[in-house]
Image: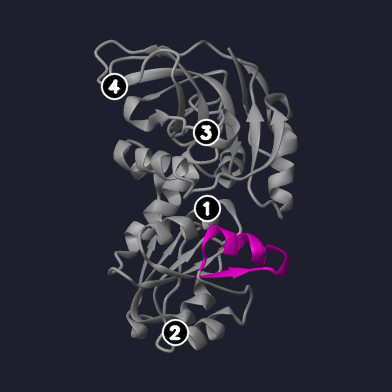
Amino acid sequence: MKAIGLTEFGGPDVLRVLDLPVPEAGPGEIRLRVHAAAVNPVDTMVRRGLAFVSDAGPPYVPGMDASGVVERIGAGTDTDLRVGDPVMAVVVVSGTRGAYAEQLVVPAESAVRVPAGLGAVEATTLPMNGLTARMALDLLELPAGATVAVTGAAGAVGGYAVQLAKADGYRVIADAAPQDEALVRQLGADVVLPRGDAFPALVRREVRDGVEGLVDTAGVAGPTLRAVRDGGRAASSVGGIEVPAERGIETRNTFVPRYVRDHARLDRLRRLAEQGRLTPRVARTLPAEQAAEAHRLLEAGGLRGRVVLTFAS
């Protein structure tokens, strides 16, 4: 089968077309014929040798989001999926096991049907990014009706965090650059404030004692903790947070592999997308052979959605 991967770490140009054996689905697994794979920041870390590469040797195939159709179901697998069903899946990269491939084997729990009304390209932006946002909110353990601040709200994970927080019944205060304010309001944020250094003070004008929780998807959690009340919680999708201990703020970091077999949470994302309460956003599509260009686009910044690689069906 054709896959896009690397045999040495480095810049985008190390990505190339590989010819790899077709993987076999064992008990508890399904094999997908991949139609689309989203390009996420973690993929660039795999490419640079910084994530998901210590447990296997080369070649490495990046990609944590895939969509396509069920091609094979392993013997004895307990699933309501059938061969030919359109599905989306979340993937844990391990050596040749990544979403940038024509065929992919995943645990049956890691795949659900593509939401009705969506195609493969839109659906592939949902599993890993949606579960990351879901985990961030779960880590906050907020009471009903709480107020949560979201940074990076115009991005893929941030946008899902806004929409999932609203689905949970929270009040949402989000940041946005001027050109993104309309988008973030459309996603459902109750209050949209300018992104940047003034954001915490502006949040405090809205909620004098500070918000109960913060979801940071922009890597600005440190200074933004000023928006969180004493004894509140913060969750980051982009790395560790340094916290002033005297304020009693609990900080937690997402690690989405903990959710890859959580079929119930993944299926809830599907249902919310079908209801129009989660909005997949595709910045651009490229043939899989142009994965290097997709990585360059991602690392250049400024995308409002995901670049999606497509494979011939």
Label at residue 207 = 2
Marked residue nearer the N-terminal end (3 or 1):
3
- State the separation of the CA atoms marked 2 and 1: 24 Å
Vertical relation: 98 (above or below) 172: above
Could you tell me if the residues under marks 3 and 2 are in contact, i.e. CB atoms within 8 Å?
Answer: no
- Check residue 180 in the rendering and tell me which mark sits there, or answer none: none
Where residue 180 sits: x, y (%)? 67, 63
Mark 3: which secondary structure?
A: loop
Kindly report the distance in space between the C-alpha atoms of the residues bearing marks 4 and 3.
22 Å
Q: Earlier in the sequence, mark 2 or mark 1?
A: 1
Residue type at mark 1? Val
- Asked where in the image residue 89 lies, by quadrant, the reply is top left
Q: What span is colored magenta in the figure? A: 173-189
- 250 or 272: nearer the viewer: 272
Mark 4 secondary-structure assignment: loop
Pointer 4 residue: 79
Q: Earlier along the polypeptide chain: callout 1 or callout 4?
A: 4
Give the labeled residue for mark 1. Answer: 157
Q: Which residue: 27% across, 17% down?
A: 77
The reply to whether dot 3 and dot 1 touch (C-beta < 8 Å) is no
* Badge 4 or badge 3: first in the primary sequence: 4
Q: Which mark is residue 117?
A: 3
Quarter where residue 153 is shown: bottom right
The amino acid on which the numbered mark 2 sits, given as a three-letter code, is Val
**Residue contact between numbered discs 2 and 4, judged by CB atoms under 8 Å:** no
Whichever of labels 2 and 4 marks the residue nearer the N terminus, that label is 4
Instruction: Please name which of the two marks, 3 or 2, marks the residue nearer to the observer.
Output: 3
Residue sitting at x 43%, y 89%: 208
